Amino acid sequence: MMSLVWLFSHQQPSTFAYARQIIKKEGLGFQGLNKGFTATLGRHGIFNMVYFGFYHNVKNIIPASKKLRLMEINSKAEPEPKSG
């Protein structure tokens, strides 16, 4: 088992150093730094379609809250009388 002293004393390269290493070895294309870019865009695209599609269809079904909102409370508050 690795000792904690070695683990914390051993400095790891930064993210920027890893990026430079990948660019040198593989380049910027879809086999290098941008590897996984298409999968990430696809995942985020599908998530956003489902999330915002669901939100758009459900937002009118859910009733509005009966409680006053903070901005409404602040705008209805009367100014404090000046002392002095």
Image (cartoon, grey):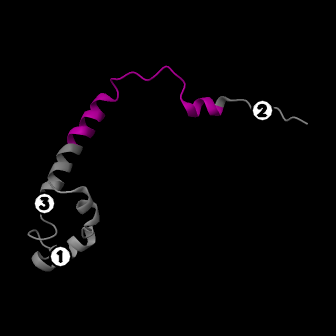
Q: Nearer the viewer, residue 60 or 17?
A: 17
Q: Name the front one of labels 3 and 1.
A: 1
Q: Could you tell me how far apart the alpha carbons at marks 1 and 2 are, in whole angstroms?
A: 63 Å
Pointer 2 local density, CA inside 10 Å: few below 14, some 14–19, many at least 20: few
Which numbered disc, 3 or 2, marks the residue that appears first in the sequence? 3
Disc sitting over residue 21 in the figure: 1
Which amino acid type is shown beneath numbered disc 1?
A: Gln
Residue in the picture at 17% in, 55% down: 40
**Residue 44 percent location from the top left of the image:** 20, 49
Q: Amino acid at mark 2?
A: Glu
Dot placed on the residue nearer the N-terminal end, 1 or 2: 1
Out of 78 and 35, give the one closest to the viewer.
Answer: 35
Residue indicated by mark 3: 36
Horizontal arrangement in the rendering, residue 4 relative to residue 25 (left or right): right
- SS under mark 3: loop
In the rendered image, residue 53 lying in the magenta stretch gets the answer yes
Pair 1/2: label in front: 1
Rendered image quadrant of residue 14: bottom left
Q: Quadrant of residue 22?
A: bottom left
Residue 12 left/right relative to 32: right
For the residues bearing labels 1 and 2, Cβ distance under 8 angstroms: no
- Which residue, given by chain and number where applicable, does mark 2 sit on? 80
What's the magenta region? 49-75
Relative side of 80 to 52, left or right: right
| Image mark count | 3
The numbered mark, 3 or 1, whose residue comes first in the sequence reads 1
- Looking at the image, which residue is at 15% across and 80% down? 24
The residue sitting at 24% across, 44% down in the picture is: 48
Real-space CA distance between mark 3 and mark 1, rounded to the nearest whole angstrom: 17 Å
Mark number, residue 38: none
